[in-house]
Amino acid sequence: MSGGAPSLLIVDDEARILAALRRCLRREGYDILTADSPLEAMRIMAERAVDMILSDQKMPGMSGMELLSEAARRCPGAVRILITGWTEAVPRDELEALGVKALIPKPWDDGELKLTLRRLLAEGP
Amino acid sequence: MDSAPPIVRIAVLQPLEGLAASGAADTLAALGRIGAEVEFDVADTADACLRSGSREGVDLVVLDRCASHVSESVLQGLGDEGPPVVVVIDSDQAEAVALDAFRAGAADCVRIGRDYAEVMPVVALEQIRRWRQLRERTTARRRIAWLERLHDAMISEIPVSLMVLDGAGRVALVNPEFTRAFGASVEQVTGARFEQVFPTDFIESGGLRDLISRGQSSVQGAARLARHRAASGEPRIFDVRCRRLDEQGHVLLVLSDVSESEILAKRLLDLERYNENIIQSINSALLVVDTEGCITFVNPTAGEILAAEGGKLIGRQVGDWFDGHAEEGSLIARTLKEGVRFKGAETMITLDDGSVLPIGISCTPLLDDERQLRGAVAIFQDLSEIKQLQRQVLQTEKLASIGQLAAGVAHEINNPMGFIHANLYQMSEYLQDLQGYWEGAERLQTTVAAADWAAAQRACESLSRLAEEIDIDFVRGDFGKAVRESQEGSERIRHIVQDLKDFSHQDTAERMLADINQCVDSTASIVWTMMKHSVVLEKEYQDLPQIRCYPMQLKQVFMNLLVNAYQAVEERLGESCETGETGTIRIVTARVDGGVAISISDSGVGIAQDSLARIFDPFFTTKDVGVGTGLGLSTSYGIVQRHGGTMRVESEVGKGSTFEVWLPEGTQPAEVMRS
């Protein structure tokens, strides 16, 4: 968080989800970056550091978990959060081992999501 | 001479030397007067005369004035058994020659003289009469002797026991077969009463006392069956016939051993009863029709299933139930028409009350000894319960498939749900912001209407501030976007739910025409939701004819195959270290061999050889507990079989698998055999 607005990278292969999340967090004061594929997310991370990553789990080519574990290497300062429509399919122990801070279900509650992101950003990675 | 026979055959010897031609004529003329038609056989040597005299039917031999030694040689040659010989003697040497002739065996001698023409016919006729009498007696004696021999031979050789009883019921005679059959010697039984000869159980079982006493008093024969147990323990059964022989009350008992045929008849009866029992008690219905399709036999089960009105089945047309469910005619009709056999086919029947019943049926032509068609035998079973069970299993399988789909489906539904939910939240925020803006706008309107320009100025400024605060330009653009995106999301959810609903739908009882490409494709689109991230789906559909089938069941088959393919691909990808890799599932449909073939290939892990053999077995699974029911492929196999189709699998570990389903275009019974 090098001055200015904290940066938030949202990754989802579903454009409508990206739009809805952007809408939701529009006035939260984040510098919102979106990627519609894990590959795009990797490119962004290669170009710049981000403060927080919110990634979908089920994506073509690479799962959200894989992406977040990559992110831990490439962008260690980032708070990592997973969002998924099938929370039951995500093994919690692996999640913890990877240092993922939260698992957000789809559909999510906007107000709660805002609070969670604020809290986690304050806590740091 | 009225007793003379119509034709008399006379052999005459008239040596040429020493006999005047006129004399020879005298003898023949004299013999010609015996009052019957005479056939002469005139010889001029002793040998020739002997030959003709020895012929059958010669009544008399006449030796006409022969030398003594000639006469003697003929007489000797003919011997005692030959026909009578009359010797004609010249008057000169009468006495001595006549005596020699008598000595040599002549029957009579006639001397040529004035009365020759009268004497000769009388002598000849007398000799012929005597000879004929003798011949008749001999024949009769021979006949009697022959009959006696025949009688003896029959009595001793006939394989039937014979016994003659006198009027007092004592044994007068038994034949060898009797002694053999009843194990008693002739000496033992002769003179004994029949009660002492036959075993008591034999007499009683046959009612022999009554039979014999009736035989003694009546010429009419009577027969009974009598049985006893032989020393060996074997039951012996005799057919006993009794017939009176004479006024003294002698009766003949004829006892034929019928044990073998009785035992065979009993066995046959047992077998018939056995068959009858089976036919009556089997769970399957059995019916027989003649060549006209007219029912000639039904067992009780068939009666129950067909449930004819008024209970009358025999004589009705089998088509009343079986027709109208196949374009080619019922299987029974086809068996009668084409002589083919059907085994394990499935079809429908219509009952008298109009309800339709699924049945499994086997049908065989009924042929006689000349292999001519005499009708058909059909064995069938009510399949309603089995069908019900099948539907339940299918439904269970379907639910299991849906369970396997749940992850994909949840993801697919929760994504649109996610943004719809978020959008609604956001839209309500927009609405709240806009509420303030609208209030400001109303205020502006009121101040302008009141021409309070200072207040209007303030209201206008505050409205501008508010517009900036809520970013009204953005909201104006985004509100509509959020609405459209949400609408689209809800449409997506509706679609998925509809697909699932379609898939979990049950089939109708009757087959219906369906487009197999559409069946495969709609199923693929459901499975696609869960596999789109890891699988490239290739489709190659050829134009196919519509198939009469149970579409939902076929969709279930395709679903099983696609889910398996997907899981095989996932497993392969899980093993692989490379990320970002995808697998391939390829669906190809084509017209093949008078049917349609649907092949589903995957680039998954493949199936090990030992599993391949058991892959269609029920409850066989290589999947983890809770992942597969082990029924998917066996259910699929059953479905394809019921459609008269086939299912094959080819697989190589590490390369992938191909499942091919083939379905016939026409509704084919499971198995047809030309007989």
Image (spheres, coloured by chain):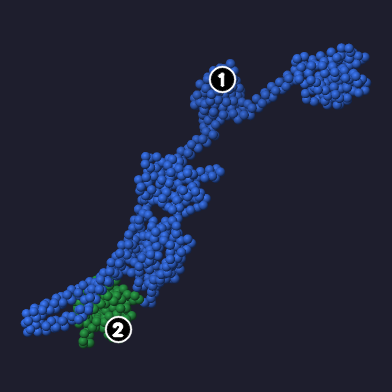
Residue situated in front as seen by the camera: B106 or B542: B542
What residue do we see at 6% from left, 82% from top?
A: B452
Q: Is residue B660 visible?
A: no
Q: Is residue B118 left or right of residue B245?
A: right
- Give residue A98's position: percent from left, percent from top: 29, 77
- Give residue B264's position: percent from left, percent from top: 52, 36
Kindly report the distance in space between the C-alpha atoms of the residues bearing marks 2 and 1: 131 Å
Q: Colour of chain B?
A: blue
What residue do we see at 75% from left, 14% from top?
A: B2
- Give residue A62's position: percent from left, percent from top: 34, 76
Q: Is residue B595 visible?
A: yes
* Circle 2 residues within 10 Å: few <14, some 14–19, many ≥20: some
* Circle 1 residues within 10 Å: few <14, some 14–19, many ≥20: some
Residue annotated with mark 1: B219
Q: Chain of mark 2?
A: A
- Give residue B584's position: percent from left, percent from top: 40, 72
Q: Colour of chain A?
A: green
Q: Amino acid at mark 1?
A: Val
What residue do we see at 20% from left, 78% from top?
A: B476
Residue situated in front as seen by the camera: B192 or B302: B302
Q: Amino acid at mark 2?
A: Met
Residue annotated with mark 2: A45
Residue B549 location, quadrant: bottom left
Q: Is residue B459 left or right of residue A111?
A: left
Secondary structure state at the residue bearing disc 2: helix
Q: Chain of mark 1?
A: B
What residue do we see at 46% from left, 64% from top?
A: B591
